Amino acid sequence: MSPSTIARRLSKGRWTEKIPGVIDLGTHEHTWRRHLQQLLLAAGPESWVSHLSAAHLHAFLDIEEPPTHDVVVRRGRHPRVGTSTLHTTTALDEDETTVVGGLRCTTKARTLLDVAPQFGLESLERLAADLARKDRQAFRQLGTVLARSAGSRGRRRLLTALSRLPDDVAKLGSPLEVIGVPVLMRNGAPQPKLQYRVRDAGGSVIKRVDAAWPRLWTIVEFDGGAWHDTTAARAHDEAARDRMRALGWTVEVLRFQDLDGPRPAQIAARLRELHAAQ
């Protein structure tokens, strides 16, 4: 199509060019993702969705669609358009980029490092734990990314958050466990065994529980509404818990509303006492 035809259609309003170099044909609905694609086109092939925008694309825990659009480009390119935030980098290896929903994007591991300065330790800990739960390969890639990023602003904070996670963090089974297990550990509870199989006297599995301290004969279950609030689920859970209690286990049940109350600290204190008495 000739430049004059393009110019004529733009002048008549049939097409628009809100971002220099990117012509909007007006054929699709205006969405947050569509604007990201326009920014990637404007920034060229060496650009990727990053930071909070990438975290939302990757479905990180509780990361809603951000009001701005984060894109990272090679250093030396500093365009800034509308509500977009263009970040620059001198170090972005090929294995730190991917494609999500047709959009060039930083990987989950690189994204977690990039957003680390924007979150407190507890929130960052939850993001890391949820990543380990949902994508073990991406969680393992964090080691490679961190090894390359000695000068990154978020590196120390992310390392601290990772150090606070349970050793078998990849076994976390639900978002409520992702939140609840670190709460217990921050209150001083000893390291639990996650997704622990409790067996009866004959060796048959009664239930795979969320967190257990076998030497202390204590179990903590995290009951989220999505899985545990039906009549059948409650009856099944209680039957299994009664069997475990009959064998001598102490079974504690925490729901989401309990996590901000006194019960996690009380449970952790009891576990410390039992541990000290051994």
Image (spheres, grey):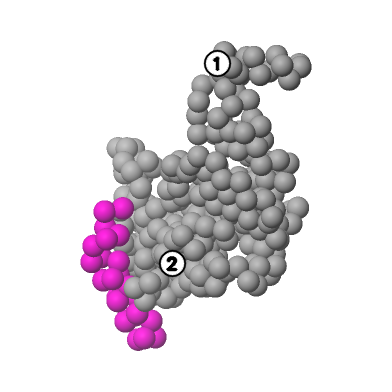
On the question of residue 65 being in view, the answer is yes
Q: Residue 199: tell me if it is visible.
A: no
Tag 2 near tag 1, CB within 8 Å: no
Tell which tag, 2 or 1, sits nearer the viewer: 1
Give the distance between the C-alpha atoms of the residues marked 2 and 1, in whole angstroms.
49 Å
| Span colored in magenta | 256-278
User: What is the magenta segment's predominant secondary structure?
Assistant: helix
State the residue in front, 157 or 225: 157
The residue at 62%/33% (across/down) is 20
Q: Image check: 181 left or right of 141?
A: left
**Residue furthest left as drawn:** 262
Q: Residue at x 45, y 47 (%)?
A: 63
Answer with left or right where residue 221 lies relative to residue 3: left
Quadrant of the rendering where the N terminus is positioned: top right
Residue on which disc 2 sits: 121
Q: Residue 81's quadrant in the figure?
A: top right
Image spot of residue 69 (x, y percent): 52, 43
**Mark linked to residue 259:** none
Q: Identity of the amino acid at label 1?
A: Gly
Q: Which residue is mark 1?
A: 13
